[in-house]
Amino acid sequence: MSDSKQSVPFRNPGWAGNTGEFELTEEQVRGDDFVGTRPPDGGHPSVSTSYPYMKVEKEPDAPLFEGAYQQRFEKILSRYPDRQAALLPVLNLAEELRGHVSAGTMDEVAKLLDLPDAYVRGVVTFYTMYNRQSVGRHLIQVCTNVSCNLCGGDEVLAAFLEHTGTEPGEISEDGNFTVIEVECLAACGFPTAVQINSRYFENVTPQDVPPILERLKAEVAASSDSGS
Ligand code: FES
């Protein structure tokens, strides 16, 4: 095991697919055809809570879409038979850029894809996974469904709220965290499951919460130091 893996103190040190049994590179697991560059945060890629091409800081007023985001938008369109079929990934892209999908963003996406505003709003409001309000840099989703609940999910949720000083759905004072309670994250074998941005933390206990939050803060600091 490499030094970078040994230095990760949590139970799920790999990106999805890396169980430690195989020496796969990140490119072999995820592919390398994304557009954009990895934020130079200096850490092992598996400890980041977001995919390498995602920015930590969101830009709620950023134009849809320019530069690398325009390339990614066009790439998404090229993968679908028509613009309507590309709606979900285009909404994901807008949320990645702006941090949430406001009513204004829904209307802009509708225009970009030549769809009725009401259709796009219906899709966004159907899926709970789209944030319709702004959230902190790290969106912490704690599962309190059956398996996780039996193993202390409520206590884990309470610990995240206590240590971030927030109520569910609020943004912490430093802008780093929003904690919400979610239904099953499909990681029932590893309760309590917590999804933070794009990454799963498994078998989380209340004692794990402070070090996890410290690590996330360090990730934000490293990202601002590197200017990404
Ligand atoms: S019950 Fe928590 S991940 Fe399924």
Image (cartoon, helix red, strand yellow):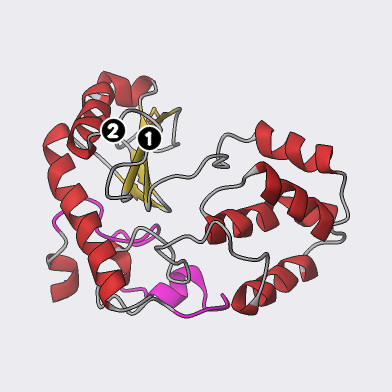
- The secondary structure that dominates the magenta segment is loop
SS for dot 2: loop
| Residue placed under numbered mark 2 in the picture | 166
Position of 70 relative to 174 (above/below): below
Q: Confirm whether the magenta stretch covers residue 150.
A: no
Residue at the image position 26 percent from the left and 75 percent from the top: 225
Relative placement, left or right, of 50 versus 74 is left
The residue positioned 27% from the left and 50% from the top of the image is 174
Q: Amino acid at mark 2?
A: Thr
Q: Position of residue 161 (x, y in %)?
A: 25, 31
Q: Position of residue 120 (x, y in %)?
A: 77, 43
For the C terminus, give its image quadrant: bottom left
The magenta stretch spans residue 11: yes
Number of residues whose C-alpha sits closer than 10 Å to that of mark 1, classed few (under 14), some (14–19) or many (20 or more): some
The answer to which quarter of the image holds residue 160 is: top left
Whether label 2 lies within 8 Å of ligand 1 gets the answer no
| Closer to the camera in the image, 44 or 186 | 44
> Circles 2 and 1: CB distance less than 8 Å?
yes
- Residue 118 image offset from top left, x and y in percent: 82, 37
**Residue drawn 33% across the image and 80% down it:** 40
Which residue range is magenta in the image?
9-37
Task: Give x and y (percent) for residue 61.
Answer: 58, 59
Q: Is residue 79 above or below residue 168?
A: below
